Amino acid sequence: MDLSYLTGQRPADVLKMAEKDIRDGALEVKQNKTNKRLRILIDNADGTRTELGKLLDRIRARPRRVRSLFLIATPNGVVLNRGTLRVRFDAARLAAAQAAEAADTPESLALADRIRQFQFRDIRPKAASEIGDLALASRLLGHTQQEITKKVYLRVGETVKPTK
C-alpha cells in the first residue's frame, strides 16, 4: 500500500516493480495502461532519501528467499498477484478498523467506519490529492491532461486562506 501511495501508480504497475527498475537515484516505471515512462526520484537534491527511497530500503532489507526480484513478494520470494494483494489489503484494513474500534470513543468508532469503507483504488486519488499541485499530481499519475487528474483523482478542495 505504501509503494502504491508514494508512487501514485495503479496496482498492476506496482505489482510489476522490480529491483531492475531502481536506477540512477530513481524508480523507473512504465505504466501498463498508457505506456508512459516515469522516473520517480528516491533521493532528494541534498542527498537524503525521499520517503519512497526509505520505503525501498525497508523492502530491500526484508529477509526473504530469492525466487524473483520483484519488490512486492512473499517472505518466500514469490511475487504477489492481484488476488494475494487483495487478500492482504483486506486483512490490513480489517486489523486497522479493529484497532480503531478498540479505543471505543466516538471519534475512533467513526474512524473505524471510514477505514472499512476505504478501498485499494482510493490510494491513487489520495496520493494525487495530497500533492497539492495539480501539475505535479498529473505528472506523477502519468496523465497527459491535467483535467483528468482534476476531475477524477483530486478529492479535496483547494486550500485557501480566510479573509482575516
Image (cartoon, rainbow, N blue to C red):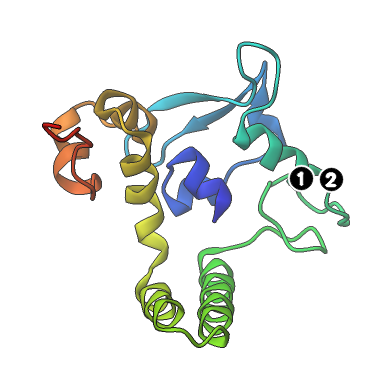
Tag 1: amino acid: Arg
Q: Nearer the viewer, residue 124 or 154?
A: 154
Name which residue lies at 68% across and 42% down: 55
Q: Is residue 67 left or right of residue 52?
A: right
Name which residue lies at 23% across and 26% down: 144
Residue 155's spot in the image, x, y percent?
23, 50
Q: Which residue is mark 1?
A: 58
Name which residue lies at 65% across and 21% down: 43
Q: Give the mark count.
A: 2
- Of all residues, the one furthest to the front in this rendering is 164
Give the quarter of the figure containing the N terminus. bottom right
Q: Are marks 2 and 1 in contact (CB under 8 Å)?
A: yes
Q: Is residue 67 left or right of residue 102?
A: right
Q: Nearer the viewer, residue 73 or 3?
A: 3
Residue 119's spot in the image, x, y percent?
38, 68
Q: Quadrant of residue 99?
A: bottom right
Name which residue lies at 19% across and 37% down: 158
Q: Is residue 94 left or right of residue 67?
A: left
Q: Nearer the viewer, residue 86 or 30?
A: 86
Give the quarter of the figure containing the C terminus. top left
Q: Which residue is mark 2?
A: 61
C-alpha separation, residue under disc 2 versus residue under disc 1: 5 Å
Residue 152's spot in the image, x, y percent?
19, 47
Residue 137's spot in the image, x, y percent?
32, 32
Q: Nearer the viewer, residue 59 or 118?
A: 118
Q: Is residue 65 left or right of residue 36?
A: right
Mark 1: secondary structure: helix
Q: On residue 154, which mark appears?
A: none
Mark 2: secondary structure: helix
Tag 2: amino acid: Ala
